[in-house]
Amino acid sequence: MIALALPINPHSGSPTDLAPKRPRGRPRKTEGERDDGNRRQELLTAAARLFRRQGFDATSTRDIAAAVGMHSGSPFYHFKSKDALLFAVMEEGMHAAIERQARALQGDASAAAPRVQIRRLIRAHFDTLHGPGNDFVPVMLYEHRSLSARQRASLDQLQMDYESTWTPVLDALHASGHLRAPVKLSRLLILGALNWSVQWFDRKKGASLDELTDAAMALFLKEC
């Protein structure tokens, strides 16, 4: 069959003028592209849970794929390797922690008394460790050595960004006499103690995150 060319009306403009105009701005994601993003997040969540419960070495990509109903090789569509998936879990956890911390100090919190600020920082940290999505940062705490040197350097920068928010608050508490120990050591000791709670804290045994925060405040700060 031979296709017949349609006659062009000389008054209708050029063929280019007849083409539909493209919408401005970013093109909308297709349903498949949106699903890819969702599947990637499912993989991260499942991997974080399994890495925390079983350990990185004892968890296979087959385990992770099965947890989200994928074929065993499907995770490699989203991540080059299990090592890359581990790094993505830790990176996701740190970004979420930084965002949660920023929300805790937003608004009038920046002008609040240092004791109020440190309480909000401690409470936000406990939320990161024990609240929704709480598998991500514990994986970072205990699987850090499984990363490459380049990955560790990238993660260390995120950790420095996170901890830098604590320093001026601790400086103010030290100046007011509420904190006796040197600021740098205080930051390391406080965060170390808070992080260790992932080993023993069980919400079902009665303590709340607010009670944990009250105990941390009483332990580390002096009443003046």
Image: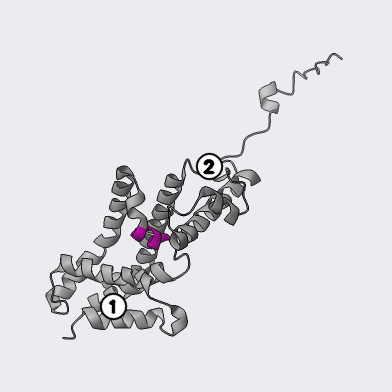
Please provide percent x and percent y for residue 44. Answer: 49, 54
Q: Residue at x 22, y 69 (%)?
A: 189
Query: Is 169 in front, or is 158?
Result: 158
Q: Name the residue under label 1.
A: 116
Camera sees residue 46: yes
Query: Is 19 in front, or is 215?
Result: 215
- Sooner in the amino-acid sequence: mark 1 or mark 2: 2
Q: What stretch is highlighted in magenta?
A: 136-142
Q: Residue at x 30, y 60 (%)?
A: 162
Q: Name the residue under label 2.
A: 76
Mark 1 in CB contact with mark 2 (< 8 angstroms): no
SS at mark 1? helix
Q: Mark 1 or mark 2: which is in front?
A: 2
Amino acid type, label 1: Val
Q: Which residue is drawn at 29% across and 44% down?
A: 149
Q: Is residue 95 above or below residue 110?
A: above
Amino acid type, label 2: Phe
Q: Is residue 38 above or below residue 207?
A: above
Query: Is 6 in front, or is 53?
Result: 53
How far apart are the alpha carbons under marks 1 and 2? 45 Å
